[in-house]
Amino acid sequence: MFIPQLSNVLNRRTLYSGNAPLNDSSNSNGFSLDTGGMASFFGGEVAVTAMTTVHLDPARRWLGWEQNISVHHNGTVLEETSPFSALLMKHSARCVHTEEIKGRRTQPIAVTITELEHAPNDQDVLCTPIYPPIVAGIPILASVGTAVACGVFQDWFSFSLIVLGILVNGISCIVIGTGEFVFQYPKPRVDVPGDGVLVSDKDKEIMVLKGSGDAVKSITSGSATLHFRWRLWIKWCAILLVFQLIMQILLLPQGTLFGQIMFIGSLGVSWAYNLWLSSKNKESIQEEVFLRGVLRCPNAWRYSLGTRTSAVVFMLLALKPKDPGKILNMLLPNDTPEWLKFKDDILSRIRSNKELHFEASFFDALAPEYDKNLMELLYCDAETAYTGYLHHVALSETKKNTS
């Protein structure tokens, strides 16, 4: 029995002798594109990265009708989302304008005050417009245009592969786009003010959260899970993608040089589009979805204070906790006589809503055993924090009156 070699079976051949551009008569040297190598250059990693966020943008589900290299999804894996508290702090550091509070500067720490006016619902579906839909028209038009060009010059192998890629990619986007990014968090039994504070010693960041218990709980304990309604269809999409890959391997060499160029050209445009989609950091997309979909873009103010002491006092003034002493001792654990005296005075004034202004006579009245220079530095830091807090109150009131 004679078994022909695979290379002889898959040799490129032309089904017509017309006047197509770059046909066999004009290609006397038998030149053929290394379509497999070029397709791998426009490979599936970028396409997979772009596909992982399709469920977050409602418009992209319907805009996947372009030719793409076949990529096989081995199951659907959702990487663990970053804690929303960390996302919020990173967003604050990157996007919120920082105002410097004048005063002594040794170890600057940023304090962000976030007002959570919206309490999210448990089991909310997170999605928000991320990319302008009009951009998706570029790869769609390129894929349709190259398919039409192959059809006009009767290169039906290349035509069928481009059309197959359009259909498979479009169907896959619709199916994967049915996934719902569901936000969930343990709701408190009673909706009470849940003001809280987030501290990152590594990034020298403090964040004060002002709002209801639900709103604060959604940040500190919230999580998101991807749920699919059409699980069976995902398996069929995987089969279609494998079928597309096999067809590309078997049939693409049978097309004309012109058809192969059209095929690679459509892949190149889709690759550039997917590269643009995947260029946006996934964590920044999660931030955007969380801030818009869950917190509804809360008001935030960010201040830079020159010392840890002034930052902690500023935070206590803004937070107004029930037990300020516990937080103060946790963040400023110093227990020398000077520090203990300073913390007692500050806590007493915060609890009684007294001003943190200290005249020269105040320092003259201090007991002689205290280090006067250190005490002046500490109380001046507290006064700086108080001045900054009054400035914040004025900004917050102006914001409320103008909104």
Image: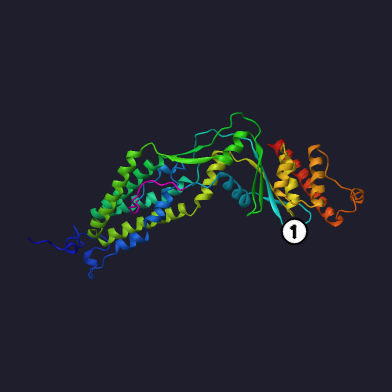
Is residue 129 located in the magenta-colored stretch of the structure? Answer: no
Q: Quadrant of the C terminus?
A: top right
Numbered disc total: 1
Q: Quadrant of the N terminus?
A: bottom left
Front position in the image: 121 or 260:
121
Is residue 367 in view from this perspective? yes
Q: Residue at x 29, y 49 (%)?
A: 164
Q: Which class describes the residues within 10 Å of circle 1: few (<14), some (14-19), or many (20+)? A: few
| Stretch of the chain drawn in magenta | 67-79
Residue 63: where, in percent of width, then height?
Answer: 40, 44
Is residue 75 located in the magenta-colored stretch of the structure? Answer: yes
Residue lying at the far bottom of the rendered structure:
29
Residue 319: where, in percent of width, then height?
Answer: 71, 40
Question: Would you say 104 lies left or right of 298 here?
Answer: right
Residue 229: where, in percent of width, then height?
Answer: 38, 36
Among the 4 quarters of the image, the one containing residue 40:
bottom left
Question: Would you say 217 lies left or right of 134 here?
Answer: right
Q: Residue at x 85, y 53 (%)?
A: 376
What secondary structure prevails in the magenta region?
Answer: loop
- State whether residue 75 is above or below residue 373: above
> Which secondary structure lies at badge 1?
loop
Q: Residue at x 36, y 56 (%)?
A: 267
Front position in the image: 4 or 354:
354
Indicate the amino acid at tag 1.
Thr
Residue 27: where, in percent of width, then height?
Answer: 24, 67
Identify the residue under disc 1. 106
